[in-house]
Image: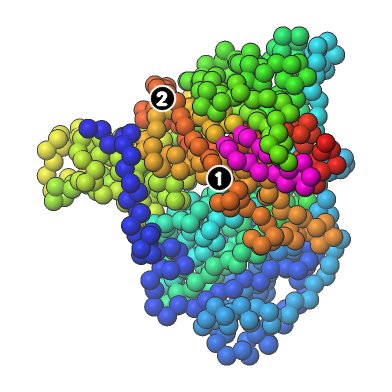
């Protein structure tokens, strides 16, 4: 029986529920010292003086790192990593120092005693679309053209039967994994061991080796378990560099560094706020004649990060006239980064609400409107889709959700009831990864430097390996989360399972070619899977989905509840229904959270996020997510990769917020175009 497709329980489950799974901060080391970061209290300027005397006088303090006294790093174009190299401050919350002490409490206390003097410059943290310094970046993530144009959108709008041209926005939001960013670092005998909470042990190794001018072999990064990443741990941030500096300042002494929750809102990235000027024009039958998005985002003055907000507009629906653009404001703010479904998650909000608005204006069912605008091929590249089952998702979702029963103006006592739908999409691609397979004592050991963020990689890679080797899962040990294993790509872009699984297939081919089905102890083979890269191959490769929401709004208080969310996805072959469902439901729940709650409020007077803790930054809880159901259709995609698997980690969040906003409109008649959907945006308009 094939292991792939089975409901195998998590291999790491027992270790996690019994508390024996060790996370980065808990790495077993002797005589650890503790490091606490100090963050700038100004948004722009320079550190002109640091008085460390009171901190150093505190018993138990070992050292204080400041801009004046740390080692020079190798030149890097990633200014986020060039910590303490000079006294420049480019955003409030930037790392300006760190204390190392015998306990975490002493370190934290001493951090308060370090006195900084600043030269303060005027800062500017206000993100708007009428700034005169907005610019067109050379490229948007992941290396795409910033602007595209086909036909003539202006002309099409002038001759359209109906046009929706509205501005939508999504706010700054933070990843907030349960496990904060954390490191245990040990510098001993000219080599460095890092236990680091990361989505990519190999990128941490590469970046750290480069910054400290070390051979990659002298750096080992270990990370068997991660308590959530969502992109914030997809690339290293300044905290790990500080941990290494501290370890090198105290050779032989392991250093533990964990961020506080408040620090998590300052230095490890966030989803940029987006403003989306969206245009959808249609003829009398609802066929789109033009589709356009002018997208705006912010980045930090010291590092460019360009969210690909308009990317999904380029491929989602057919229309002869199309245009997308991206403009960026470089502000005195922290550096944004990837966050679950970068590009697609914010970028499908505006368009999927606009399509709903158009459906409403045309009097066409929003599912039917989407069906009418299915493209034959990728509308901008002309590539055929390797598989595209959006319509099947919409149809099956409608059936399961009871879409046909929706009635406008439904009411249950004081509650106004509505339903809404939106589409989801996320690209499917693979990256470069090497896997090693060894046979010993009738067991196969498969090693690669992959990461399990809590997603199920330990489990699904075992299933893939067992089938590839033609043995039961009990005979396979997959080992991941260590840079000592062969190079593996980041757990990001929903590319992990397809990439690492393909690498295991490739290595298993090599193993069987060499040794047949009856290997001897010590037989070993290794091979590298090249992957498609972000550009993909000759096909347009995407997962699709349909999101359905029921929303109830209290007629007097405006309280908003989402009693039901239902998603149907077409994401290629599902390796493990149990872990897959968890990914889809997790994404949808995060989408619900984005729709109703999440909003990092940046106070432009100070340049920092004021609701920087989980008391004031609200995240959906169990009582918000009462009924979240994920389904998928059987999809056989022979083109996407040998496994036939598309990513599933991110698509669940895409479209959720639009479905909820559309349902709220159906319930109340009020169209909210700016997330989050909070009751103050409904109250004035309620009947
Ligand atoms: Mo994910 S945002 O691709 O790490």
**Residue at the spot of label 1:** 626
Secondary structure, mark 1, is loop
Quadrant occupied by the N terminus: top left
Find out if the beta carbon at label 1 lies less than 8 Å from the nearest ligand 1 atom.
no
- The reply, left or right, for residue 159 in relation to residue 434 is right
- In the rendered image, residue 347, in percent from the top left (x then y), is placed at 67, 34
At x 49%, y 71%, the residue is 256
Q: Give above or below for 261 relative to 468.
A: below
Could you tell me residue 561's position as x and y percent? Answer: 66, 43
Question: Crowding near pointer 2: few (<14 within 10 Å), some, many (20+)?
Answer: few
- Dividing the picture into quadrants, the one containing residue 307 is top right
Residue tagged 2: 634
Q: Secondary structure at mark 2?
A: loop
Percent of width and height locating residue 590: 58, 45
What residue is rendered at 60% in x and 41% in y? 563
Q: Is residue 616 magenta?
A: no
Q: Is residue 607 above or below residue 252?
A: above
Nearer to me, 11 or 534: 11
The answer to whether residue 163 is above or below residue 10 is: above
């Amino acid at each position: 029986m094939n292991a792939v497709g089975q409901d195998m329980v998590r291999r790491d489950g027992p270790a996690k529920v019994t508390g024996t799974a060790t996370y980065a901060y808990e790495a077993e080391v002797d005589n650890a010292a503790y490091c606490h970061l100090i963050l700038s209290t100004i948004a722009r300027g320079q550190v002109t003086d640091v008085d460390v005397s009171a901190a150093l006088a505190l018993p138990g303090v070992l050292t204080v790192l400041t801009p004046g006294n740390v080692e020079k790093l190798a030149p890097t174009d990633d200014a986020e990593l060039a910590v303490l190299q000079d006294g420049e401050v480019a955003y409030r919350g930037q790392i300006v120092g760190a204390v190392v002490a015998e306990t975490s409490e002493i370190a934290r206390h001493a951090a308060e005693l370090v006195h900084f003097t600043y030269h303060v410059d005027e800062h500017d943290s206000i993100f708007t679309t009428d700034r005169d310094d907005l610019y067109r970046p050379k490229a948007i993530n992941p290396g795409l053209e910033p602007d595209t144009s086909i036909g003539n959108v202006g002309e099409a709008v002038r001759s359209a039967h109906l046009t929706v041209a509205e501005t939508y926005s999504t706010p700054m939001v933070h990843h907030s994994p349960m496990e904060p960013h954390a490191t245990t670092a040990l510098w001993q005998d000219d080599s460095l061991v890092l236990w680091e909470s990361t989505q990519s042990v190999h990128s941490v190794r590469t970046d750290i080796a480069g910054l400290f001018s070390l051979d990659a072999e002298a750096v080992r990064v270990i990370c068997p378990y991660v308590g959530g990443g969502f992109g914030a741990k997809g690339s290293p941030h300044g905290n790990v560099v500080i941990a290494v500096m501290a370890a090198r300042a105290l050779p032989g002494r392991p250093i533990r560094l964990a961020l506080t929750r408040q620090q998590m809102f300052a230095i490890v990235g966030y989803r940029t706020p987006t403003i989306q000027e969206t245009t959808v024009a249609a003829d009398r039958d609802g066929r789109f004649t033009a589709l356009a998005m002018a997208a705006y985002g912010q980045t930090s003055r010291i590092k460019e990060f360009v969210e690909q907000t308009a990317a999904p507009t380029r491929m989602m629906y057919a229309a002869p006239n199309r245009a997308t653009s991206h403009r960026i404001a470089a502000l005195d703010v922290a550096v944004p980064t990837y966050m679950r479904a970068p590009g697609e998650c914010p970028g499908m909000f505006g368009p999927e609400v606009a399509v709903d608005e158009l459906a409403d204006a045309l009097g066409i069912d929003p599912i039917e409107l989407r069906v009418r605008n299915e493209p034959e091929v990728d509308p901008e590249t002309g590539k055929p889709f390797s598989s595209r089952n959006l319509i099947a998702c919409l149809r099956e979702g409608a059936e399961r959700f009871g879409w046909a029963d929706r009635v406008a103006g439904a009411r249950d006592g004081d509650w106004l009831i509505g339903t809404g739908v939106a589409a989801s999409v996320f690209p499917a691609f693979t990256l470069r990864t090497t896997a090693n397979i060894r046979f010993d004592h009738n067991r196969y050991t498969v090693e690669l430097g992959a990461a399990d963020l809590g997603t199920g990689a330990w489990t699904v890679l075992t299933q893939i390996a067992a089938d590839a080797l033609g043995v039961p899962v009990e005979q396979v040990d997959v080992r991941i989360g260590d840079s000592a294993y062969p190079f593996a790509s980041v757990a990001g872009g929903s590319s992990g399972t397809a990439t690492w699984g393909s690498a295991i297939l490739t290595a298993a081919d090599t193993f069987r070619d060499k040794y047949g089905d009856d290997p001897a102890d010590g037989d070993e083979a290794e091979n590298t899977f090249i992957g498609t890269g972000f550009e993909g191959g000759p096909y347009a490769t995407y997962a699709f989905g349909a999101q359905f929401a029921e929303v109830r709004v209290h007629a007097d208080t405006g309280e908003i509840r989402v009693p039901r969310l239902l998603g149907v996805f077409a994401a290629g072959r599902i390796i493990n229904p149990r872990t897959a469902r968890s990914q889809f439901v997790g994404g949808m729940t995060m989408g619900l959270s984005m729709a109703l709650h999440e909003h990092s409020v940046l106070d432009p007077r100070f340049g920092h996020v004021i609701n920087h803790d989980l008391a004031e930054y609200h995240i959906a809880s169990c009582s918000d997510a009462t009924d979240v159901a994920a389904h998928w259709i059987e999809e056989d995609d022979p083109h996407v990769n040998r496994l036939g698997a598309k990513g599933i980690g991110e698509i669940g969040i895409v479209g959720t917020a639009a479905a909820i906003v559309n349902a709220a409109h159906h319930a109340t008649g009020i169209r909210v175009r700016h997330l989050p959907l909070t009751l103050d945006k409904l109250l004035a308009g309620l009947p």
